[in-house]
Image (cartoon, rainbow, N blue to C red):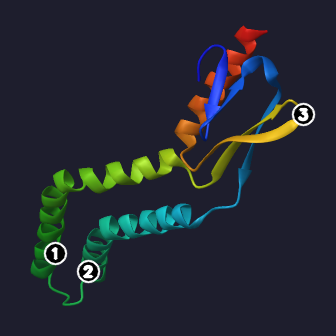
Amino acid sequence: MTSSWVQAYGLSYPLSDLSYVWHRRTRRDLRVGGRIAGRWALVTLLTAPVAVSVLWILTDWSGAVGLTLVGLAFLLGLVFTFTPLSEFPLMALERSYDRGSAVHEIWVQCRGMDVLLVRTNDALRFGQIYRALQRALEQSE
């Protein structure tokens, strides 16, 4: 996109020919569903060891205080061991939320025809493109 035209899918559209711009969210596609499933998997992997340790300590199956202290030490060991390693799955989880869980489309009306300019499931990228298009249209008027 430049200050005078927009290019999408190999075609160029002059900004002066664009009369109306809108966006819409569509249903999730397979990639977005996979991202949501990945989020659940990451959350489960990150919380399961700690949850099991906490439950073990709380239920105190043996009734012995010593075993509870061993369980507490085990939990602390898990926390100290996996805290630095959990940085990578947490970053992946954060990126998946940044991308969003819907498919966004930007449409324009060019010479009386509705044209799809962008279709993406990356919410951040969608927002950047939509704002840039709005600014370019405002400046071209």
Distance, label 3 to label 1, CA atoms, is 70 Å
The quadrant where residue 55 appears: bottom left
Residue most toward the right? 112
Residue 122: % across, % down: 53, 46
- Callout 3: 10 Å neighbours few (<14), some, many (20+)? few
Residue 91: % across, % down: 33, 48
Residue lying at 57% horizontally and 50% vertically, measured from the top left: 121
Q: Amino acid at mark 3?
A: Gly
Q: Which residue matches tag 3? A: 112
Q: Amino acid at mark 1?
A: Gly
Residue 71's tag is 1
The quadrant where residue 27 appears: bottom right
Q: Are marks 2 and 3 in contact (CB under 8 Å)?
A: no
Mark 1 falls on what kind of element? helix
Q: Going from the N terminus, do you reach mark 2 or mark 1 first?
A: 2
Q: Going from the N terminus, do you reach mark 2 or mark 3 first?
A: 2
Residue 59's tag is none
Mark 2 falls on what kind of element? helix
Q: Are marks 2 and 1 in contact (CB under 8 Å)?
A: yes
For the C terminus, which image quadrant? top right
Residue 56's tag is 2
Distance, label 2 to label 1, CA atoms, is 7 Å
- Callout 1: 10 Å neighbours few (<14), some, many (20+)? some
